[in-house]
Image: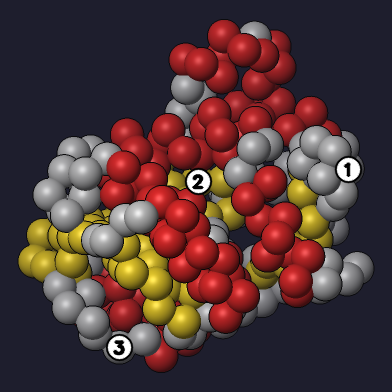
Amino acid sequence: MKNTTMERELEIMYDFSLEIPTRKYVEEPSILMHLGNIQGKKILDLACRTGHYAFLFQKHEAEKVIGVDVSPRMINLANRKKRMLEVENVTFIEKNVKSLGKLEEFDMVTSIFLLNHARTEDEVRKIAEVIYENLKEDGIFLSCTFNFHHRGYIRNRYKNYKLEIIMDEDDYINGSPVNIEIIPDHHGRIFITDYFMNPRIYEKVFKEVGFKSFKWIPLTISKEGKEKFGEKYWAEYIAYPYDILIKAIK
């Protein structure tokens, strides 16, 4: 499968992926719920893409938000949004997270589908070290990442949620590519490659880096999502959720 759509197309289409049901009615409300009160907080958003969560945090009265992404086109689009929204306390930096180093100490660090791009334990460690050194003592790290706690990735399992994820038994090896297809309504298709990593690797690395706590947290379907689609619609996602939260405290 193609690694991605054309890079330019992926960046243009990224925001459409935020409209698929699991992202709009599960991911976003779950992240806000588990971050808690962000008013007056300084937040570092790693793999910020076009700035969706950075602007969401700003809307919820974060004092300062810095978004980091490796893609110059993503950062360009994020800055275009910033100018349109006329916000002053959101900044975007084009940089590979693994080589970011320390910017300052933040109250919170977030990463939405970043860790699932790590192919090796060493890459996970480099990301975890950057997160750790950019957090204040007792600061919160919250991530939404791919859920490899089950092996239920069969064809058409997530078709109702505008996704296609297929894994063979040979794919459950650390570093194996996981091909994902996102199908937003009326906006073509987005192809993304993630990588399998045994969840115990994340637990081990974050503990070794120095985090005091590390928890896996299931996402919660919002009341709006339940009312819009009904309980039966969500049954397959509840049985085999493809995403999961990580919450770690420095």
Label 1 belongs to which residue? 155
Quarter assignment of residue 230 = top right
Image coordinates for residue 246, horizontal then vertical, percent? 39, 52
**x 64%, y 37%: residue:** 19
Is 135 on the left-hand or right-hand side of 152? left
- Secondary structure type for disc 2: strand
Position of 148 with respect to 81 (left or right) is: right
Q: Which residue is mark 2?
A: 244
The mark that comes first in sequence, 1 or 3, is 3
Up-down relation of residue 107 to residue 98 (above or below):
above
Residue at 79 percent across and 56 percent down: it is: 190
Which of pointers 2 and 3 lies earlier in the amino acid sequence? Answer: 3
Location of the C terminus by quadrant is bottom left
User: Crowdedness of circle 1 by 10 Å Cα count: few (<14), some, many (20+)?
Assistant: few
- Residues at marks 2 and 1, CA–CA distance in whole angstroms: 20 Å
* Label 1, label 3: how far apart the Cα atoms are: 40 Å
Q: Position of residue 82 (x, y in %)?
A: 42, 60
Labels 2, 3: front one: 3
Report which residue position mark 3 lands on. Answer: 101
Crowd tier of the residue under label 2, counting other residues whose Cα lies within 10 Å: few below 14, some 14–19, many 20 or above: many
Q: Is residue 196 above or below residue 154?
A: below
Residue ranking furthest to the left: 137
Would residue 14 appear left or right of 164 to someone viewing this image? Answer: left
Going by the numbered disc 2, the residue's amino acid type is: Ile
**Residue 241 sits above or below residue 151 on the image:** above
Q: Residues within 10 Å of mark 3 (few under 14, many from 20)?
A: some
Q: CA distance from mark 2 to mark 3?
A: 26 Å
The tag earlier along the polypeptide, 2 or 1, is 1
**Residue 60 place in picture, x, y as percent:** 27, 40
> In the rendered structure, which amino acid carries the disc numbered 1?
Arg
Q: Amino acid at mark 3?
A: Gly
